[in-house]
Image (cartoon, helix red, strand yellow):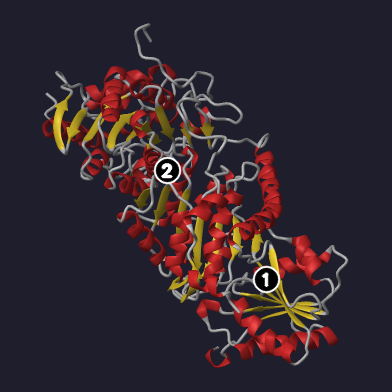
Amino acid sequence: MSKTAPKTYITSGHSGCAGCCDAFAAKFTLMGSGPNTIVVNPTGCLEVMSTPFPYSSWQVPWIHSLFENAGAVASGVEAALKALGKKDDVKVVSIGGDGSTMDIGLGSLSGAFERGHDFTYVCMDNEAYMNTGVQRSSGTPFDASTTTTPAGKVSFGNPRPKKNMPAIMAAHGSPYVATTSIGFPRDMMRKVKKATEIVGPTYIHAQAPCPTGWGFDTSKTLEIAKLAVETCLWPMYEMENGEITQVRKVKDPRPVEEYLRAQKRFKHLFTKEGGEEEIKKIQAIADWNIKHFGLQ
Amino acid sequence: MIDPAYRKKMVVVEGSYAVAHSAKVCRPNVISAYPITPQTHIVEHLSQFMADGEIPNCEYINVEAEFSAISALIGASAVGARTYSATTSQGLLLMHEALFNTSGMRLPVVMTVANRAISAPINIWNDHQDAIAQRDTGWIQLYVEDVQEACDTLPQLYKIAEDNEIMVPGMVCMDGFILSHVYEPVVLLEQDLTDNFLPTFQPENILDPEDPKTFGAFATPDTYEEFRYLHEQAMQKALSKIETTAKEFEEVFGRFHGGLIDGYMLDDAEIIVMSMGSILGTVKDVVDEYRAKGEKIGVLKVRSFRPFPKKQICEAVKNAHAVVVLDKNISIGTNEGALFTETKSCLYNSKVRIPVIGYTVGHGGRDIRVESIAKVIEETKKVAKSEITVESQFLDLREELL
């Protein structure tokens, strides 16, 4: 980071893997939200690697309760700050993975958004349950091989496309929903800052490639993240009050094959008979993104 | 006879209203609850107090499930708010995972449980299975006998739970419908007296950007055991705190419902009936009849089930000839209620050698009649004279349905 970059509030020394996406996501989130932030962190890699008692990497107040209740815990933090007259000065930010956000914690998060609590939820989406060893989540993309949707003689991996989580959060009437990527730190910091400055429940969905779970070299985390955006498999946009207001254009989209070939979780698409047809289906997802979000 | 001046202070209200009023005068900062029969009226009355602006500096969160109710209070309590919820039955079971989490993080959340049976079969009436199923969650559990005690125990429990030496959450367990929906004369807690009795909540550790702290860290085998040990130590400290707090309450309000336990006609009792909750009123009526006939029957009320007052129970029953325990719950597979099992357990290594038998009673709200209690006492008298033939059994089984 350059000398002019904002200060971050999670220290090194945690036990994240080399090239860990969660460490990037937490770092950029706090660089966006600043020091007057209370972090609510559901169970996951980030929580485990950053707080082995008696150590903590967090230089802001931080609470971890359970896997599936970050939305509710954040609601309580926000309500208590209001009741005690402290809310004006303090931001409440929850940082959770795709499992805790899109699956097991969705009910609690939905409740918190529907009630209109003033907080920001950041989903760092590494597209599977990495903490337990790469099992599929509803964020796992089509045809990715995971330990519970392995590619095999009669399987191309995960049979379903990703759940459209930003649309779900926008449907709650959220004033601000944005997608971003850890491959674009400035974009992520700007969006988190904006989200935390808007009153009401705001949502940031950041793609966060996991070297261990996706199968790429630990030096390539940010490169893979950029490739997802450049192949239009990860559209970056902002929604204000349900309407798309900003889109990051991709001038010359690269074929999805480049992104898929770089990761072991898609290796079977290049070795198994019928893989070419599958790659076409994934290209069709990127083409839909280009059209739907006006990426070009 | 009730003193006429005191009688003047009494009003006839629904149990749920009286409890909601009690929660209000404890000045909670965050209330979070989800409706479920028979607890619903408590949170409805609190909602009305909020709508009328009667609870200052308080936020009420209408959550989407009990799991979120308790989770929201975890967050709120960690910020330093005094917190309140009320639930029962399936709602309490839905909270189960988070109950451990609340107590493990040593957050002194307080709630009222309007005890109700659990499903299946679905049943909305009273027994204690819901709260007994939470006995290992590390919460203080105080069982109350009547509406006045349900009201009076709330500020006591805040004082116990929020003590910096304790910092353990707690539940006031009151019998659903029997107490939550009954209209009976009570003294609604006075705000000024409650303020005198209950200090403001001042935890040593809170979530505050000025002094960042980490809550809910990850503990390895190197450190986990000590967290459990310290939690147990805090519960042991709560034993004496429950006693002193009940006395302090009496000094301010003039009412005493027992500390860890309470006795009725206990001193010379040869046969002792032990139980928890509203059933004690019926038992006392039956005991009065026996006493009128000159028979030495007494009642031992267990008010604190967690922490479990082993020493006090041993001391209270040591001179009896036999004890019978009435449980509104059962641990299926042992054919015993929890109070019965634990009473036997605490006597085993003591010098007290008396027979103890148990009945599981009132499942799913089945009425417990005076005749049935008398039958239980007659059986216990036999045990005192000869030996135990049936150690534990269901009361008032309808054989024709089996």
> Which chain letter goes with mark 2?
A
- The tally of labels here is 2
Q: Position of residue B377 (x, y in %)?
A: 72, 86
**Which numbered mark, 1 or 2, is in the foreground of this view?**
1
Residue at position x 58%, y 44% in the image: B106
Residue at position x 69%, y 60% in the image: B308
Q: Would you place residue B284 above or below residue A87 in this image?
A: below
Badge 2: residue crowd in 10 Å (few <14, some 14–19, many ≥20): many
Left or right: where B145 falls relative to A129? right
Left or right: where B381 falls relative to A17? right
SS of the residue under disc 1: strand
Left or right: where B97 falls relative to A214? right
> Which chain letter goes with mark 1?
B
Q: Which residue is mark 1?
A: B301
Q: Would you place residue B322 above or below residue B305 in this image?
A: below
Q: Position of residue B342 (x, y in %)?
A: 72, 65
> In the rendered image, which quarter contains the N terminus of chain B?
bottom right
Left or right: where B18 falls relative to A237? right
Q: Is residue B394 visible?
A: no
Residue at position x 58%, y 61% in the image: B253
B363 and A35: which is toward the camera? A35
**Mark 1 → mark 2, Cα distance in angstroms:** 37 Å
Q: Would you place residue A69 above or below residue A33 in this image?
A: below
Q: Where is residue B133, by image quadrant?
A: bottom right
- Numbered mark located on residue B260 in the image: none
Q: Is residue B273 visible?
A: yes
Report the amino acid beneath label 2.
Val
Q: Position of residue A226 (x, y in %)?
A: 28, 20
Q: Residue furthest right?
A: B351
Residue at position x 80%, y 66% in the image: B314
Report the amino acid beneath label 1.
Lys
- Numbered mark located on residue A73 in the image: 2
